[in-house]
Amino acid sequence: MRTVFLPRRGLLAALAFLVLLGGITAYCQIRSKPAEPASISAQPIYQGNSGQKAVAITINVDWGEEYIPAMLEELNKAGAKATFFVTGSWAQKNPEVLQSIFAQGHSIQNHGYKHLHFAALLPAQSAAEIKKAEEVIYDITGHRTVFFASPYGEQNRQIMQGVQSINYDLVMWTVDTIDWQKPSPDVIVKRVMNKVQNDSIILMHPTEPTVKALPVLLQRLQEEGFQMLPIEQIVVPKPNEAPN
């Protein structure tokens, strides 16, 4: 076998070409991979970060519309603003109630189109359910939602991927009144006042005991110096984040 010797300059050129070819191949492989969704490192929001002596009263709504007018009356008496997380299907059935909530200055946010187990959905399915609800709410109020509270309080990696893929925040709670079990009004008040702190997110539902608990609860919160603000006023973007 005959050995071929390349001139020094030719050898260097060949090596440079191989290095360049390898770099191009690696770059193409990287570019061909799908980008990792930003939601992988995202976390649900359990508490606000405004630093204010304030709380967000959040009310998840998929039923109980008969109690909402009385809840609005008590909130308005106290000068409190709440956040109503509504399903799109409920909004379609109760557009006048939704318009009334919005007209009175309360925040309207997203509870999905239907009250599903989002933990069983793929990220794209979760995103589609949220966007469907968003369009329904927008058609009724002219307002775009940016916060999502999952039915049953479910949260996992797949939900986070779906939520973040459409630039939503997943909201949980600091204090759960568990009022859907219909405890006494006194129990609801105690559950809140025993745990409330600055920037707390207080979870409620439209029930008869909740309506009865509200006057006392709102008065107690005011006596403790808490403002009752919409969720978007206690969950604020960090310095390196753009607002929703």
Image (cartoon, grey):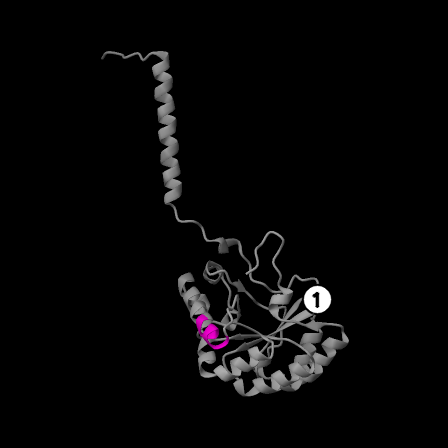
Q: In the rendered view, does 176 fall on the left or right side of 159?
A: right
Instruction: Answer whether residue 136 is magenta in the image.
Output: yes
Residue 136: x percent and y percent? Answer: 44, 74
Residue that numbered label 1 is attached to: 198
* Number of numbered markers: 1
Which quadrant would residue 122 be assigned to in this image? bottom left
Q: Residue at (35%, 30%) from the top-left corner?
A: 21
Image quadrant holding the C terminus, namely bottom right
Q: Position of residue 204 (x, y in %)?
A: 60, 77
Q: Residue at x 43, y 49 (%)?
A: 35
**Magenta segment range?**
135-141
- Magenta span has 181? no
Q: Nearer the viewer, residue 6 or 109?
A: 109
Q: Is residue 93 left or right of residue 177?
A: left
Please tell me which residue is depicted at 36% across the width and 19% down the height of the picture.
13
Q: Is the residue marked by circle 1 packed among few (<14), some (14-19), or many (20+) residues within 10 Å?
A: some
One can see residue 117 in this view: no
Q: Is residue 162 visible?
A: yes
Above or below, 199 relative to 82? above
Location of residue 37 in the rendering, given as x and y in whole percent from the top left corner: 46, 53
Numbered disc 1: secondary structure: loop
- In the image, what residue type sits under mark 1? Asn
Q: Residue furthest left?
A: 1
Q: Quadrant of the N terminus?
A: top left
Vertical placement of residue 10 versus 52, above or below: above
Residue 24 percent coordinates (x, y): 37, 34
Please name the predominant secondary structure of the magenta segment in the image.
Answer: helix
User: What residue do we see at 67% from left, 70% from top?
Assistant: 55
